Image (cartoon, rainbow, N blue to C red):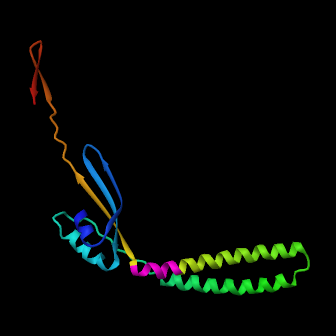
Amino acid sequence: MHGNIRRFGGYVAQEEQNQTDYKIENTITVKVPVDQFDDLITALTTAQQKLIDKKITSEDVSTQVVDTRSRMEAKKQVRVKYLDLLKAAKNMEEILSVQREINSIQEDIEAANGRIEYCHIRRPIARSILLISRCWMFRLKTTAKFLTARRSGDHLKLDGIG
């Protein structure tokens, strides 16, 4: 499995394994280039291991970018109004109050701009996240001995089966 992951340009971002006497559970989080995702899925599901469950979902972030961009533009318009209020401030208390609001709005604008840039920058190196869960079950071999009791006169006779 790890060979297939590397072959398709992916890497293991996280791996967890739990083991008991009767099973081993292994969960792997893989990051793989978007254009290699389908090929990796095919390689993993055609292996000799039995596939029990498969679920693939996707998320389109383009609406988030549009929403963030429109919120950023609205914040810029509010900032312009606060700058006008700053010019009209009459005392130091008003100036400081308006300036705090402007600073807060400016931080929101910069954060939104950062999110938009991140989405555009990461697009060429976008990676799909694949969560793989595997479980191996073991059959317990028991060597239980069964005893039967039967009466023979006044004596108790035990027959062991083992």
Which SS does the magenta portion mostly show?
helix
In this rendering, the answer to whether 130 lies above or below 119 is: above
Front one among 85 and 57:
85
Q: Which residue lies furthest to the right in this view?
A: 90
Instruction: Say if residue 1 shows up in the picture.
Output: no
In this rendering, the answer to whether 160 lies above or below 19 is: above
Q: Which residue lies furthest to the top in this view?
A: 154
Image point 71% across, 74% down: which residue? 104
Determine which quarter of the picture holds residue 13.
bottom left
Q: Which quadrant of the figure contains the C terminus?
A: top left
Task: Give x and y (percent) for residue 107.
Answer: 66, 74
Image point 33% across, 58% down: which residue? 27
Task: Give x and y (percent) for residue 5.
Answer: 27, 67
Number of numbered markers: 0
In this rendering, the answer to whether 76 lies above or below 6 is: below
Task: Give x and y (percent) for residue 153.
Answer: 9, 14
Q: Which quadrant of the figure contains the N terminus?
A: bottom left
- Left or right of residue 31, residue 147 in this image: left
Image point 31% across, 69% down: which residue? 10
In this rendering, the answer to whether 70 lies above or below 159 is: below
Task: Give x and y (percent) for residue 95.
Answer: 85, 76
- Left or right of residue 108, residue 13 in this image: left
Asked if the stretch drawn in magenta spans residue 107, the answer is: no
Determine which quarter of the picture holds residue 33.
bottom left
Instruction: Say if residue 69 shows up in the picture.
Output: yes
- Extent of the magenta region: 117-124
